[in-house]
């Protein structure tokens, strides 16, 4: 069975988390293995389900087949930086690694890391239903626009018009294609 994706988005305070949680319980009750992922930095799924959830996929107590995760931007950034730096450690000395680490210390990296974590769920087929409880509209639009913005910025930078933030370009291109393919279906 192909994974079904459901997005709850809108301005703050309109009930996105309540609707995402209710929908998650509904599908889990129907026997569907369901994951609720919040991209909201002010996540409150832990409050809704009255248990610790955090930055890892967590089984919801008392509801068979329901799991949740609250993407933590700081932890996502640390994971992304390590994933980016790990292959370089065998190739370069500590000074070069330090320079690469410094390049990955800007706000651009947090955006890339959050997008990378978001995309991780688009490539997995372990859940029947994945529900995205998104951050308020402005934050969500920015997250969804990142692939296009980065592509334009990288293209301009390659023409000599400036620098770009560091990106795992091969995985970024693959993730972008995967996301576009899934959304078109």
Image: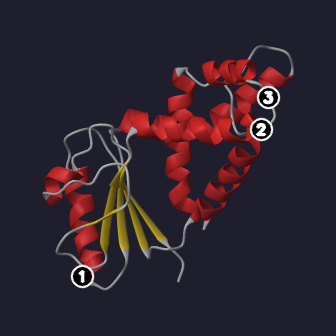
Where on the picture, by quarter, is residue 49?
A: bottom left
The local crowd at label 1, few if under 14, some if 14 to 19, many if 20 or more residues have their Cα within 10 Å, is some
- The x, y position of residue 92, in whole percent, is 79, 28
Where on the picture, by quarter, is residue 128?
A: bottom left
Relative to 164, say whether 176 is above or below: below
Disc 3 designates what residue? Answer: 92
Relative to 143, say whether 171 is above or below: below
Foreground tag (1 vs 3): 3
Disc 1 designates what residue? Answer: 29
Q: Residue at x 66, y 35 (%)?
A: 85
Disc 2 designates what residue? Answer: 90
Q: Is residue 62 visible?
A: yes
Q: Residue at x 37, y 77 (%)?
A: 33
- The x, y position of residue 2, in whole percent, is 54, 78
Q: Is residue 183 left or right of residue 170?
A: left
Secondary element type, mark 3: loop
């Amino acid at each position: 069975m192909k994974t079904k994706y459901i997005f709850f988005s809108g301005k703050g305070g309109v009930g996105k988390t309540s609707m995402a949680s209710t929908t998650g319980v509904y599908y889990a009750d129907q026997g569907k293995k369901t994951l609720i992922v919040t991209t909201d930095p002010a996540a409150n799924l832990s409050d809704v389900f009255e248990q610790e959830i955090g930055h890892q996929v967590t089984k919801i107590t008392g509801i068979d087949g329901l799991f949740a995760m609250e993407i933590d931007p700081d932890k996502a950034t640390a994971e992304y930086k390590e994933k980016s730096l790990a292959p370089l450690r065998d190739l370069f000395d500590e000074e070069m690694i330090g320079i690469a680490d410094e390049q990955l210390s800007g706000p651009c990296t947090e955006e890339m890391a959050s997008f990378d974590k978001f995309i991780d769920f688009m490539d997995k087929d372990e859940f029947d239903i994945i529900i995205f409880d998104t951050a308020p509209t402005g934050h969500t639009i920015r997250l969804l626009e990142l692939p296009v913005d980065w592509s334009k910025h990288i293209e301009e930078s390659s023409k000599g018009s400036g620098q770009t933030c560091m990106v795992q370009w091969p995985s970024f291109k693959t993730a972008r294609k995967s996301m576009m393919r899934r959304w078109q279906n």
